[in-house]
Amino acid sequence: AAGANIGTRFLASVEAPIALGWKHRIVEAEAQDAVKVEVWNDISPVAGSRGYGTVIRALRTPFIDTWQQRRDDARREADRLRGEVLVALQQGRIHELLPFAGESAGLVHDIIPAGKIVQRLVAEARHALERSQTLLTKLGTGPGASKS
């Protein structure tokens, strides 16, 4: 892999400055609960450009379900909807409307310190590398394989 996108895992860390309810939503989510929220680009377009073409993902909510189906209405009501989102953000309940999270939420099963997340990542990477070395050696293509 060239990289990894693990922001959702870190949202469900002890240190993440988001509401505990949002963290619990991530822990309880299945991968398919994270949906593309195309309507967000209608409600809050990037000023002066087309942006990066990025569509955010969030865990489904009634807000998302309603406005995804009514994108033209969302564009017309964008100012009001942005205000609603801003109030929810200020009140610490943005997760009731837009609990941002990716499909990897389905792999998150606990809320732990960020340091422990990093330790797990390192341990899992080390295990995967060791396993790949073992498999390559058994196939006769890796380091330590006999050259016949």
Image (cartoon, rainbow, N blue to C red):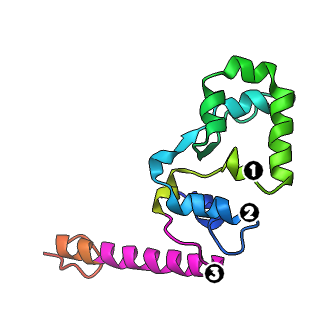
Magenta span = 108-133
Mark closer to the chain start, 1 or 3: 1
Considering the whole magenta stretch, tell me its main secondary structure: helix
State the residue at coordinates (56%, 51%): 102
Residue 135 quadrant? bottom left
1 and 3 marks in contact (CB < 8 Å): no
Are the residues tagged 3 and 2 within 8 Å (C-beta)? Answer: no
Contact check, label 1 and label 2, Cβ < 8 Å: yes
Q: Looking at the image, which residue is at 63% across and 63% down?
A: 23
Residue labelled with disc 2: 18
- Identify the residue shown where x is 68% and y is 66%: 20
SS label for mark 1? helix
Label located before the other in sequence (1 or 2): 2
Judge depth for marks 1 and 3 and give the one in front. Answer: 1
Q: Nearer the viewer, residue 80 or 134?
A: 80
Q: Earlier in the sequence, mark 3 or mark 2?
A: 2
According to the picture, the residue beneath numbered tag 3 turns out to be 115
